[in-house]
Image (cartoon, helix red, strand yellow):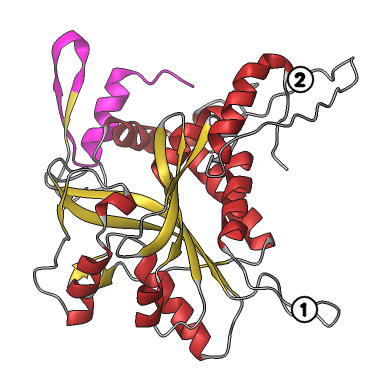
Amino acid sequence: GVDVPEADVRRLLTAIGFEIETGEDGVLLCRVPSFRPDVEREIDVIEEVGRLFGFDRIPEPTHSAVPVFVPREDPGHALRRRTLSMLSSLGFRELYTNSMLRKETAERFLVPDLLGLRQPRGIIETLNPISQEMAALRPTLLPGLLQVMAHNRNHGQRLLRFMEFGHVYYRSNNGTYLPGYTEYESFLIGMSGPRDAMTWDAPTQPADFFDLKGIVEALLEQWHLADVTWTPVPAPTPLTAYHLEVASGGQRLGYVARLSDALTEAYDLDQPVFAAELHWREVVERAAPNLQRTYVEISRFPIVERDLAVLVDVDQPVGPLLDTLRHAGGPLLRHADVF
């Protein structure tokens, strides 16, 4: 840099229409002419002085300090990128559906117990809808999924696998951005039809509820979520025949469900539909601390396997049984499974 004398600064700025006054502590106060709307900040005035003084008269530094840092990807973006990559490799296609739908449809899909909504007071209607098809905001991503499945099924497609990230909305007592209105990002996985694409050497098998549950379990493992629990809800809801609620560390994340026949028949779908919807912000908050890759030393001792036979009730859920085994095994137990 270079020190420009105050007299030269006054002369240069006055020549282009600036009015200069002296403030406290020798600070120069500049009144910008009306025909220079591009001069808004102090740095703009400094640039004018440098331009008139001559940039060629300002010596270049002999070395420059370049900050070196490793940028860290936003946890939400990193998690979404990994999720899309994994599901794409399994044949899922990403959807972008409309956030608006019919009022009757929005009311039908507003099931607070299934969606885990907090203090819901109803759907959000638009004041001046373009048409009745856009009279309300969606409380869940399910309507868009079913519409896409119906469209593909009507065009002869049987292997249906879709995923979507999108915002959902409902009226509440608290609200997120506006009082009385709640908005959050949801993540939906849906599948229907055969388990795999048709091949010449093996018959096709229909996908079932446990295929989707296994995919969600693989995602939870990739996200490194701890203390995952599954709670069965056998009682049907207006949208589901049965479903499982999934939680991590006591925080509810969402559900995995088989949609009811009445719902799928309303969309002219002739094959069962399975869907999982997760609260994406809750997933990111739980998974963000575990995204940093860590390494542990390889054990110097050989593994020891134990085959335990226990007698339990026929309706005993597997989740609590595995939690008991892991808790009893302590840090020495690395893996437990039921077969």
- Asked whether, in this view, residue 5 is left or right of residue 315, the answer is left
- Amino acid type, label 1: Pro
Viewer can see residue 67:
no
Viewer can see residue 169:
yes
Instruction: Assign a secondary structure to mark 1.
Output: loop
What residue span does the magenta drawing correspond to? 1-28
Q: Is residue 6 above or below residue 32?
A: above
Q: Are marks 2 and 1 in contact (CB under 8 Å)?
A: no
Residue pointed to by mark 1: 203
Which residue is depicted at the point 73% across and 32% down?
309
Expressed as whole percent of the image width and height from the top left, the position of residue 222 reads 63, 41
Q: Is residue 123 above or below residue 49?
A: below
Disc number placed over residue 296 in the picture, else none: 2
- Amino acid type, label 2: Val
Expressed as whole percent of the image width and height from the top left, the position of residue 30 reads 18, 30
- Asked whether, in this view, residue 291 is left or right of residue 339, the answer is left
Asked if the stretch drawn in magenta spans residue 10, the answer is yes
Mark 1 neighbour density, 10 Å: few (under 14) some (14–19) many (20 or more): few
Which sits in the foreground, 128 or 188?
A: 188
Which residue is depicted at the point 34% across and 81% down?
266
Mark 2 neighbour density, 10 Å: few (under 14) some (14–19) many (20 or more): few
Which residue is depicted at the point 25% across and 52% down?
112
- Observer-side mark, 2 or 1, equals 1
